[in-house]
Image (cartoon, rainbow, N blue to C red):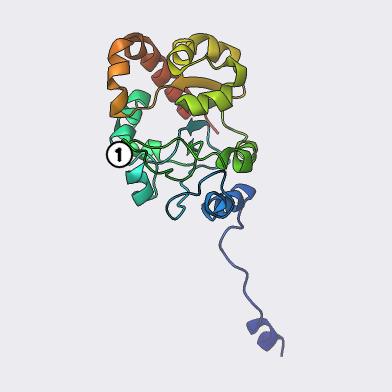
Amino acid sequence: MLNADLSNMVKPSLKPLPTELDELFADIRACRICVDHPIRAPLPHAPRPVIRGSATARILIAGQAPGTRVHASGTPFTDPSGDRLRAWMGIDEATFYDESRIAIVPMGFCFPGLDAKGGDLPPRRECVPAWRDAVMASMPEVELVLAVGLYAQQWHLGKRAGAGLTETVADWRSILEATSAPQVLPLPHPSWRNSGWIKRNPWFEDELIPALQGLVADHLRRPD
């Protein structure tokens, strides 16, 4: 009788229980706030939030919003901008997409659509107030934030952000020194559209990029 009773018991699942961050990311990936409760005009297509990370990630890439290729793939930086960003960081794709070490959390989770000239619209305004504080609180091990673009810089730096992107990125040394837990390093967007900006500001490749690669290597080699 005892054996029969045991055989009818439900066996416990071997799958790990979801963490707080898993549940938060699941909620974000199901989010429809920009369609159902938009600020101004709704998102012009079905939402597809893109976010990656874990509670153990040491580095956070805070970008702007997915573009058309990322909207199609569902994976951030699967485009030439991603190739350039990985080169700036001095890492390969496997390392870049290792969620246990690197989180990718844009300011807007969905592709915002295109403007009249064919460029990407700014990140949706609904994402930050709804989700960003909770995401940052759920990744306590982040030690370095790469603030890519002015939108990310304004949120992560607050009053330390300059009046424009050039002023903010040019001040990268004092920003690194002034920020802690985590440190913040401002970067331009790695889009090909910023190639002219990079040529006009040679200090970016000569001075900031080597510092960036050193910081990334240092944080990635630290033991858990």
Residue furthest to the bottom in view is 1
Is 33 in front, or is 82? 33
Q: Residue at x 49, y 20 (%)?
A: 185
Residue 168 location (% of width, % of height): 48, 15
Q: Residue at x 43, y 41 (%)?
A: 98
Secondary structure of residue under mark 1: loop
Which residue in the protein does label 1 denote? 79
Q: Quadrant of residue 224?
A: top right
- For this view, does 131 lie left or right of residue 107? right
Residue 85 location (% of width, % of height): 35, 29
Residue 6 location (% of width, % of height): 67, 82
Local crowd size for mark 1, using a 10 Å CA cut-off: few (<14), some (14–19), many (≥20): some
Q: Compared to 208, does 133 lie above or below?
A: below
Is 37 in front, or is 160? 37
Is 107 in front, or is 83? 107
Is 88 in front, or is 203? 203
Q: How many marks?
A: 1
Residue 75 is at least partly visible in this image: yes
| The N terminus - image quarter | bottom right
Inspect the image, locate mark 1, and give the three-letter code of the amino acid beneath it. Answer: Asp
